[in-house]
Image (cartoon, helix red, strand yellow):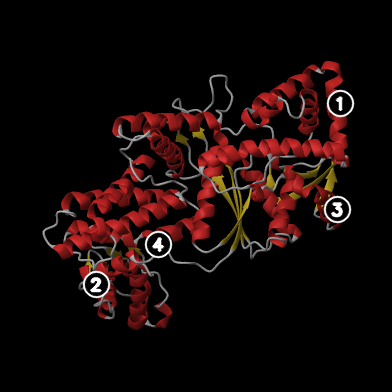
Amino acid sequence: MSSPADVLTERLQHALGAAFGTEYAGVDPVLRPSQFADFQANAALALAKRLGSSPRDVAARIVEHLDVADLCLAPVVSGPGFVNLTLSGEWLAARVAEQAADPRAGVPLQEPQVVPIDYSAPNVAKEMHVGHLRTTVVGDALARTLEHLGHHVVRQNHIGDWGTPFGMLIEHLLDVGEHSAEARLLVDDPNAFYQAARRKFDADDDGFADRARRRVVALQAGDPETLRLWHELIELSTAYFNSIYQLLDVTLTDADLAGESTYNDELAGICAELEAAGIATVSEGALCVFLDGFTGREGRPVPLIIRKSDGGYGYATTDLATIRHRVRDLHADRVLYVIGEPQGLHLRMVFAAARKAGWLPDTVEVVHVQIGNVLGKDGKILRSRSGEPVRLRTLLDEAVERATVVLAGSQPDLDDAARATIARQVGIGAVKYADLSVAHDSEYTFDLDRMVSATGNTGPYLQYAAARIRSILRRAGGDADQIAPVVVTDEAERLLALALLGFGDVVAQVGASLEPHRLATYLFELAQTFTTFYDHCPVLKADDRAVRASRLTLCAATLAVLEQGLGLLGIAAPERM
């Protein structure tokens, strides 16, 4: 289903070709909303100099060749050379009815691509903190949106599951017992387990540090018993991860785990291949890749270290193996890394090295979806009173508690089970929406009071809008079950119809720009537009039966868009609020 902007763009380009020659048929008419019309075409201003004519004369010639009588009122030239276009009520009504009957609510399917998305990426035996919130929530919204657009999304949860700390973690697991309460801390309080192991390592009680170092050697050598214990650590940590993912309602599963250990057997070959090709050279005992354009102080080249001077491998080696796998084995067309902004330089160097090695061809797009910081009310990175990153579970539990208090006041008749379900949907939705409603590369302040408010640009406001529409449709009974012919006469009806028809374009824009906040902004504006419509246009009490049926269809179409849009953001739409 083509959007109004797409249809008008096609007609305008045809008019440009007819008026000025086929070489102008592909010119972008630059359509924008206007206070004077639904859309305003600005092509004449850009073309005037090329055509040696005044902008208004160019605009007049465009209008002369513009065939839009079936969808617009008569076009009007205004200002210095704008072409104002107002869609007819009949055309709008027909398109909205068509969208209301479409299970996809007007979102087109795109030519499918294979899109691996690297997101979340917690560490084994460590607590997920607020820093993991954004990469998890943004990555999941992008995965849902791209899948909805028809792409094959490959989720890649690149967990930290390898390295020297595992020696002390395995030894500590042996000391406390695999089935002990202390071992269960990996599921309930991973930081407590990790910190206990670290304290023993630092104190070196009873030779613990030496045992831990020997255990690392055994792990890297593939000792079967050590590998069994390592797997036990991962399984316990995975249970913890999954408890957070379930609470957050994200789509990551165990099948999406693709930790650092996955590529362990490939790292020596990565280094050998780069060295044989002359791309990597030894510098101060380490094997490094030096890339054009990456310099530090005094213009000295910055190395990408792929093998340390002690023979160990770092993040760069694993990341090179990862991107090679995603292109060579997953056959990626587009690879997304939903990772914090501070990793930008590292990723650019990895991408450049992979292209130089031929592992990342120009035909594959690779994107760092940069994630900004979450701030406290003091304007600094959000931390606990002890100075540690705030535990993610603590924040989520508090959000649900706040939502429970709000619901107790607004919906006192709910039974305990229903209140608990809705409070979780509202509390988690509030946190996710607050994150997704701002640009992913910007900072935002974590303020639970504002997040759980049912007024303003918040998740609960949108959830309430959907719940209110459901209430209207329930009260309408069987009359709401049929899609009726839509009649657009009132200005509020017209604005709602226009807003609804923009949904497909916005979802497509999110897929292209990888900016979920565009969808959040659209949904908030749609909810506001619906409120204006409902205030000005009686629905259940409409005098005319046909008008009542038409407005019920508008309500149903709005609910479908809100539900689908919130779903793409990973936010539930409760039945009642």
Label 3: few (<14), some or many (≥20) within 10 Å?
few
Q: Amino acid at mark 1?
A: Arg
Q: CA distance from mark 3 to mark 1?
A: 32 Å
User: Which sits earlier in the primary sequence, circle 2 or circle 3?
Assistant: 2
Q: CA distance from mark 1 to mark 2?
A: 79 Å
- What residue did someone put label 1 on? 211
Q: Nearer the viewer, residue 359 or 17?
A: 359
Residue at (26%, 59%) from the top-left corner?
A: 478
Q: CA distance from mark 2 to mark 4?
A: 20 Å
Q: Nearer the viewer, residue 205 or 3?
A: 205
Q: CA distance from mark 4 to mark 3?
A: 48 Å
Of marks 3 and 1, the one in the foreground: 1
- What residue did someone put label 4 on? 504
Q: CA distance from mark 1 to mark 4?
A: 59 Å
When asked about the image quadrant of residue 494, the answer is bottom left
Is residue 375 visible in the rendered image? The answer is no
- What residue did someone put label 3 on? 272
